[in-house]
């Protein structure tokens, strides 16, 4: 079953973003994922702090998404992201 991943980022250091942006999209695609949307969210209604960036992805399966996140190729980029941004990640089942 297809799944969506929603990622919220609040930056403390943006120096990693250029390298991440050059390399990670190809890794996502190789894992069977697609970027659906990304950018600074326009606030329509919020109770808490709004993140600097939100990205939405789809993957062919939960296993494909989790394999991507755990892959040795992605690890250095995940480490950069974790060091430079507060990250919230969510996985949702796609509706049929």
Image (spheres, rainbow, N blue to C red):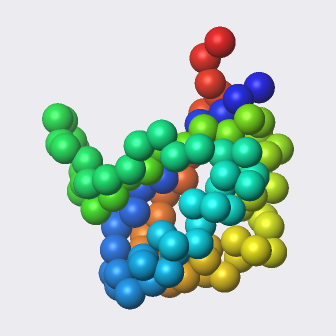
Q: Position of residue 49 (x, y in %)?
A: 24, 56
Q: Is residue 58 above or below residue 8?
A: above
For the N terminus, give its image quadrant.
top right
| Residue 9 to residue 59: above or below | below
* 3 horizontally vs 1: left or right: left
Residue at image location 64% in from the left, 61% down from the top:
26
Question: For the view shown, which residue lies furthest in the top direction?
Answer: 96
Residue 76 appears in the rendering: yes
**What residue do we see at 65% from left, 12% from top?**
96
| Picture coordinates of residue 91, whole percent (x, y) | 61, 41
**In the rendered image, the vertical position of residue 11 relative to residue 30, given as above or below:** below
Query: In the picture provided, is 45 more to the left or to the right than 75?
Result: left
Q: Nearer the viewer, residue 47 or 17?
A: 17
Which residue does the image show at 70% across and 71% down from the upper left? Answer: 74
Could you say where residue 45 lies in the image, as x and y percent from the top left? 18, 36
Percent of width and height locating residue 67? 81, 56
């Amino acid at each position: 079953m297809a799944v969506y991943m929603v990622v919220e980022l609040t930056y403390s250091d943006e120096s990693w973003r250029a390298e991440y942006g050059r390399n990670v999209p190809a890794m996502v695609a190789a894992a069977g994922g697609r970027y659906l949307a990304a950018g600074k969210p326009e606030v329509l209604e919020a109770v808490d702090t709004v993140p600097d960036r939100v990205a939405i992805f789809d993957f062919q399966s939960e296993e494909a998404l989790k394999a991507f996140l755990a892959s040795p190729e992605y690890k250095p980029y995940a480490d950069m992201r974790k060091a430079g941004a507060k990250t919230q990640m969510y996985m949702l089942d796609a509706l049929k």
